[in-house]
Image (spheres, helix red, strand yellow):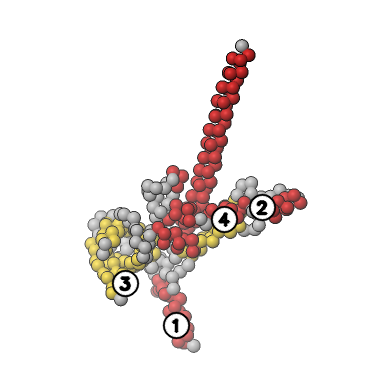
Amino acid sequence: VILTVAAVVAFSMTKPPVFQTEARLVLEGSTFENGILGEFSALSQTPPAVQQVEILRSRKLARFVVTHPDTEDLPDFARGLGLGLSVTVDDLDKHWPRATMKRRLFRTPHPLGGLRVELPRPYVDTAITVLNLVFLTDDSVRITTTNGFEELAKEYKLEGPRSEVEFYGRRLLLIPDGELAGRTFRITLRGVRAAIDDMLSRLIVRETQRGSGVIQILYSDTDPNRAQRLVNGLAEIYVAYKRDRVSRRAGATMTFIDGEIGRVDLELEEAEDALI
């Protein structure tokens, strides 16, 4: 019994945490009319919410979410809304079970501050790379990774609030916040395609009830703040996408109407000339 309990505790303390966040979207004008005609209409056609769920789960919107907000090939409505998920940072001393258990046992305060990492150039590797970064002091770090059976490690001296380091061909921009001596972070590097696949594997989009017109977005991640930013970012990009479609449709309608007005004016002038 003691060995079993010890094994379960050890497994629980090393297992990554899972945080789930939720957002809800209301589709205006998506509910059916009351009465028998409304019920027959609901049975004979695809509910609008089903179409919107497919849009929210599409790789197109997922790409807008995971790419860097300054990516050049983004459409105008998606600029500035991306989260740049080709690089993600997990704070092992803040959210991991082992650190949480240690704080509860020794009554230590919750760690403050954090680390932000940016990529000077887009990450195009197809393989996913995981780096472990440990702050030896507030201005020096040690980065390690496993390459097959070989462990690669380097130490760096940070200079200023934004320090660029190169770890075996991978350039990282480290932006620490607060006193981080002794803190451990896990950095994950992945290409846009791998980031999209990872996002869609953690994403659940569904209608709360058939015909309700309310869409529920659920997302699970090892970092609660990142999960919250993702569901909010997906909702913002979805709203911007719908607004852009309505705007382009209205613009096409106005162009058609202007053309028809010009044609009718020309016919009217010809008719007046013939009458005169």
**Which residue sits at x=49%, y=50%?**
237
**Which residue sits at x=51%, y=52%?**
235
User: What label sits on residue 146 in the rendered view?
Assistant: 3
Pointer 1 residue? 7
The span from disc 2 to disc 4 (Cα, nearest Å) is 16 Å
Q: What residue type is labelled 3?
A: Thr
Q: Can residue 100 be seen in this view?
A: no
Q: Which of marks 1 and 3 is nearer the N terminus?
A: 1
Q: Which of marks 2 and 1 is nearer the N terminus?
A: 1
Residue 206 position by quadrant? bottom right
Q: Where is residue 275 in the image (x, y as percent from the top left)?
A: 63, 14
Q: Which of marks 3 and 2 is nearer the N terminus?
A: 2
Q: Earlier in the sequence, mark 2 or mark 4?
A: 2
Of marks 3 and 2, the one in the foreground: 2
The span from disc 1 to disc 3 (Cα, nearest Å) is 25 Å
Q: Where is residue 184 in the image (x, y as percent from the top left)?
A: 34, 67
The span from disc 4 to disc 3 (Cα, nearest Å) is 39 Å
- Badge 4 crowding class, 10 Å Cα cut-off, few under 14, some 14 to 19, many 20 or more, is some
Q: Is residue 55 visible?
A: yes
Query: Which of 148 and 88 lies nearest the eye of the viewer?
Result: 148
Q: What residue type is labelled 2?
A: Gln
Query: Which of 82 and 109 lies nearest the eye of the viewer?
Result: 82
Q: Which amino acid does label 4 sit on?
A: Val
Query: Which of 120 and 270 lies nearest the eye of the viewer?
Result: 270
Q: Is there CB contact under 8 Å for labels 2 and 4? A: no
The reply, left or right, for residue 268 in relation to residue 34 is left
Q: Is there CB contact under 8 Å for labels 4 and 3? A: no
Pointer 4 residue? 53
**Which residue sits at x=55%, y=59%?**
205
Q: What element carries label 4?
A: helix
Query: Which of 258 and 4 lies nearest the eye of the viewer?
Result: 258
